[in-house]
Image (spheres, rainbow, N blue to C red):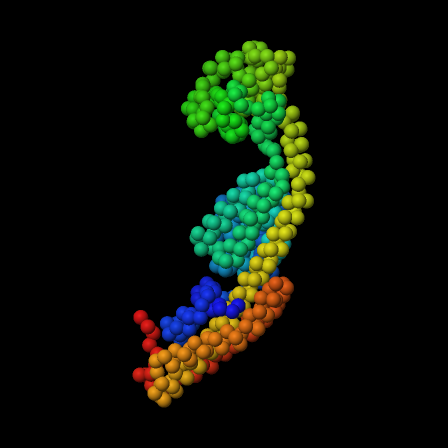
Amino acid sequence: MTGLTYLMGIGGYQSIPGQASAWWSQRCLCKLRGEPLVVPVARTLDELILITINHRSAPLKVVGKLENLVEQAYERLYPYTDELVILATCNRFEVYALESPRLLIEAESLLGDAAKYAVVLRGLDAARHLFRVAAGLESAILGENEILGQVAKAYESARSRGYAGKYMSLLFHYAVKTGKLVRSKTMISYGNVGAPGAAVHAAEKVLGSYDGRRVLVVGAGEAGSIIATLIRQKSSSARLMVVNRTYERAERLAKKVSGEAYSLDKLPELLEYADVVFVAVTVDKPLLTRDLLERMKHGALVVDVSNPSAVELPVPSHLGYIGLQGLEKVIQKTLERRRQEVPKAERIVEEQLALFRKAWMRRAADEAIAVMMEYAGRVVEEELQELHGRLRGLGVDGAALTATGDFAQSLVKKLLRPMIVYAHRAAVNGQAHVLEEIVEQFRREIEKRVTNRPERDSPPRNRLRCPP
């Protein structure tokens, strides 16, 4: 800690190098004398709390309705906590906060009947849950990628609006970092487990590659859009043709994937020279009839992700065919491959959790040190004021008074160094109770000085004036 000076202020403190610190300047002395500074309160990891209702603990229809409560949750819960982040998706509604006596009562009132599905976790268990969520280990579809972005977005939204501070920043920084590490060091997100993605993967295995292939996508809805986008990601040379009942919708998708748009009446002629046809439509009866299928070239592949099926079965023998039943097998194989990666992913989560815990404890140590320095600042300010009054009475002024301030600064740093080292060692060893005792003892001393501080009787002409 040699060479560091601590500056106290609203919202915490910062450490800066150098001997000449503003903390010891007349400006800061005036602030200490005129405006009591807020001493940061160290929060233990046990004060971290999570209230979660998710797809594992509640029916999806219950979870889905809670997504609309985000703004109300911030308004009602923030008055009872220092920091708050709400993570709300179609599969989960989660409140991350620093605990207070009233918080849980207000949360129960907010959730209403859904409160019976809530699970409450604290401390390291709460952090572990968030890390697992970010890693895709708690998703309805193991390893899905979207949740990582949702976690980051939830924190950023809370931070930008003043709900999340340094503790939530630390928590969500490590959570997002963990999510990225798990995906880069394991195959937890291997393959595609949705029907459109699985269809693209299965067809590629049959074709070998999409390069130079004529690919026809029938349907420009959500499934068709996913299929077309994935194919373009896999191959820049594939000829992508999009057919839809509404031409304008086909045109929008085609433009997005650098393809060609056609109306539904062009389907018969497009089928004749397509290498692979993906069908993703909602119909009451088959769209690709036996007659249309007969017109397709030998060896072409038909992939149907429609439910009910939009392809008349059985398909002619000269064609290949993959339907939803076949895709289900592909999806199960992919999920099994992902499940094999879970132990690896969980090890990464625990490694990052240990680092997070140390970081939290270091922050608690820093805040304990800030309280020490706040106490030292008050003592030095009082003693220097009295000393300077006496020295002026003896005719001493100018550089000599500055020298006494420099001496006081150096002395305080040397005297407090063992306590500072002790606080950091307690943080490394996970001794939260030691840090709590330091904070409590020094806070008591600060309160005593504030309560019992005598009025100085130095003449008005000798009082220090705040510099402009």
| Residue 290 is at least partly visible in this image | no
Taking the spot 66% from the left edge, 41% from the top edge, the residue there is 341
* Frontmost residue, 46 versus 431: 431
459 shown above or below 104: below
Taking the spot 50% from the left edge, 58% from the top edge, the residue there is 166
343 shown above or below 334: below
160 shown above or below 439: above
Quadrant of the frame with the C terminus: bottom left
* Frontmost residue, 109 versus 335: 335
255 shown above or below 419: above
Taking the spot 37% from the left edge, 74% from the top edge, the residue there is 26
* Frontmost residue, 50 versus 251: 251
Horizontal side, residue 331 vs residue 4: left or right: right
Which percent across, then down, holds residue 215?
52, 21
Which percent across, then down, holds residue 237?
50, 24
Which percent across, then down, holds residue 193?
61, 33
* Frontmost residue, 310 versus 198: 198
Q: How many marks?
A: 0
Which percent across, then down, holds residue 188?
62, 40
* Snapshot quadrant of residue 250: top left
| Residue 340 is at least partly visible in this image | yes
Taking the spot 43% from the left edge, 24% from the top edge, the residue there is 251
